[in-house]
Image (tube, rainbow, N blue to C red):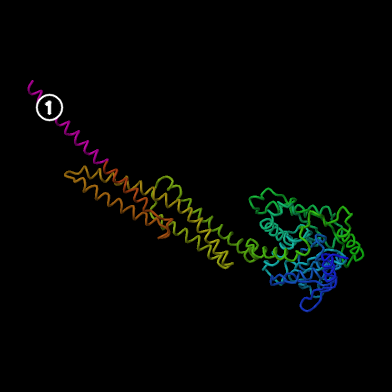
């Protein structure tokens, strides 16, 4: 007689074998139904777990695989997946050539424990320059799938944007920031399978492969990597594989043959080029896939580094940088004319007015040419330009203060010495008047050199305080010198009288 535990287990198995989930009042077909897991408004479906159950994969444990496709819009990605895996993703109407796949869709492969993701194509006119979704969807598919099929035409090989190399760079960079450390610890890897479409054979596949591999390596070398991952290599995270398919219409039979050969790489585990290697598996049980993928999407959604500029912002960055560089070059050429006199210790009359004119001209030129572009970029770059202008002007300003300080102090000393040579002088009166004139001259010269009143960058009162201390020190020293001179004069006079009297006695 079976134990209570065995009875409970048998009942559970019986219920699971008979139960099929209903989604929106319908029972999904385990072999054909697909689900939009992320819609074009970036919402993750709450129904993925039910679909995985309907597809018969809930209890598969680790005995399943996950593949996604990446590529430009209208390049036959959905058709490729349908041919390879027996899925039923919507395909493009050739007469309309418009976006077919919106968001991210998933379906189970026919007769295979494989979850297949069809990802919205890149560079579609429907989204225009707003590439936020395609970046995030691409990163999501890269982070969650074991094999990422990169679908591209033969003529796109070697092209940076058409082959989606710029997007791959963004995704690689974000992937490192979000999941790089985790990948480093768990040795998690992903296979990038490049499928070259409409291959006619004029260029050997090995040459196309070398071009793509070199482009990927170049991208990796220029990534902005986290400090702890700066020495990591492309091959630490990704394996690369390449294949080609003949033209679907012009070489239909050869295309079908190529498809069957490629399908074998996904089904025949005995093949050396079998794609689903254990190293690529994310080690997430099938009943946890929905929760896992939702977590990845939430992390991708909240990653601010992914909210990269749109094409308008990129254009604004390029043009604002270009305009800023031109304004800065003209400004620097002007500043050089006054830099040497300052370094030689000269006080330049009207330097403040000159510097303010340079600054105004540079900013006016920038505003005139850059203000028409993206306002956020324009303002940010303007602040950068202002900082660089002020850095050069600060050097001239401080140099002018130092030179003015020294010149005023020398003039003060000269004026006091001259006053002490006037018959009947009053020392305190001479010093007081000279000091007042010296400090007034310094204040006027310093105020004239200020670029922006009230800005702490252009402070001169500390220099004035230092000047006042040195004026006092000079005055004290001059009094000492004058006292010593008077004393010496008296001593000489007394000695002269002494010797005169002595000669008279003799």
Main secondary structure found in the magenta portion: helix
Q: How many marks?
A: 1
Provide the residue designation for mark 1. Answer: 498
* Rendering quarter of residue 451: bottom left
Q: Which residues are magenta?
A: 477-506
Q: Nearer the viewer, residue 444 or 300?
A: 300
Assign the N terminus to one quadrant of the image. bottom right
**Residue 492 within the segment the image draws in magenta:** yes
Task: Tell me residue 357's x, y (percent).
Answer: 45, 59
Residue lying at 83% horizontally and 60% vertically, measured from the top left: 63
* Rendering quarter of residue 500: top left
Task: Judge whether residue 79 can be spotted in this image.
Answer: no
Q: Nearer the viewer, residue 128 or 225?
A: 225
Q: Nearer the viewer, residue 157 or 324?
A: 157
Vertical position of residue 503 compared to residue 419: above or below = above
Residue at the farthest left position: 505
Tell me: 407 left or right of 86.
left
* Rendering quarter of residue 32: bottom right
Task: Tell me residue 55's x, y (percent).
Answer: 83, 69
Badge 1 local density, few (<14 within 10 Å), some, or many (20+)? few
Residue at the farthest top position: 506
Residue lying at 91% horizontally and 62% vertically, measured from the top left: 257
The kind of secondary structure element at disc 1 is helix
Assign the C terminus to one quadrant of the image. top left
Task: Judge whether residue 28 can be spotted in this image.
Answer: yes
Task: Tell me residue 269's x, y (percent).
Answer: 88, 56
């Amino acid at each position: 007689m079976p134990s209570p535990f065995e009875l409970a287990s048998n009942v559970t198995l019986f219920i699971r074998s008979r139960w099929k989930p209903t989604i929106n009042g319908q029972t999904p077909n385990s072999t054909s139904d697909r689900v939009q897991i992320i819609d074009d408004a970036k919402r993750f479906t709450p129904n993925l777990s039910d679909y995985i159950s309907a597809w018969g994969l809930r209890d598969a444990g680790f005995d399943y695989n996950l593949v996604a496709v990446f590529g430009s819009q209208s390049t036959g990605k959905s058709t490729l997946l349908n041919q390879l895996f027996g899925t039923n993703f919507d395909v493009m109407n050739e007469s309309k050539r418009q976006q077919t796949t919106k968001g991210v869709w998933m379906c189970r492969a026919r007769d295979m424990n494989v979850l297949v993701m069809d990802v919205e194509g890149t560079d579609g006119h429907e989204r225009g320059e707003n590439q936020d979704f395609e970046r995030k969807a691409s990163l999501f598919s890269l982070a969650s799938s074991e094999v990422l099929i990169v679908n591209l035409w033969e003529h796109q090989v070697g092209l940076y944007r058409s082959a989606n190399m710029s997007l791959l760079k963004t995704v690689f960079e974000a992937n490192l920031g979000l999941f790089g450390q985790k990948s480093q610890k768990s040795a998690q890897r992903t296979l990038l399978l490049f499928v070259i479409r409409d291959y006619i054979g004029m260029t050997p596949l090995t040459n196309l492969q070398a071009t793509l591999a070199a482009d990927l390596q170049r991208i990796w070398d220029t990534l902005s990597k986290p400090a702890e991952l700066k020495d990591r290599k492309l091959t630490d995270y990704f394996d690369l594989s390449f294949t080609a398919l003949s033209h679907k219409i012009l070489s239909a039979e050869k295309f079908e043959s190529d498809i069957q050969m490629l399908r074998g790489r996904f089904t025949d585990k005995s093949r050396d080029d079998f794609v689903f290697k254990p190293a690529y598996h994310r080690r997430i049980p099938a009943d946890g896939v929905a929760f896992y993928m939702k977590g990845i999407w939430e992390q991708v959604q909240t990653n601010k580094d992914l909210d990269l500029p749109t094409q308008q912002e990129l254009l604004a960055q390029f043009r604002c940088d270009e305009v800023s560089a031109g304004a800065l070059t003209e400004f620097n050429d002007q500043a050089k004319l006054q830099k040497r006199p300052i370094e030689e210790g000269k006080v330049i009359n009207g330097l403040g007015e000159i510097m303010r004119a340079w600054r105004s001209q540079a900013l006016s030129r920038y505003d005139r040419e850059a203000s028409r572009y993206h306002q956020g970029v324009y303002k940010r770059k303007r602040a950068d330009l202002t900082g660089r202008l002020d850095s050069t002007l600060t050097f001239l300003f401080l140099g002018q203060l130092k030179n003015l300080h020294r010149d005023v102090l020398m003039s003060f000393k000269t004026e006091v010495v001259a006053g002490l040579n006037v018959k009947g002088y009053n020392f305190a009166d001479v010093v007081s008047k000279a000091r007042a004139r010296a400090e007034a001259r310094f204040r006027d010269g310093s105020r004239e050199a200020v670029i922006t009143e009230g800005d702490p960058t252009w402070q001169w009162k500390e220099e004035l305080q230092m000047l006042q201390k040195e004026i006092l020190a000079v005055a004290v020293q001059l009094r000492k010198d004058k006292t010593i001179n008077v004393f010496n004069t008296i001593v000489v006079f007394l000695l002269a009288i002494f010797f005169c009297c002595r000669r008279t006695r003799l």
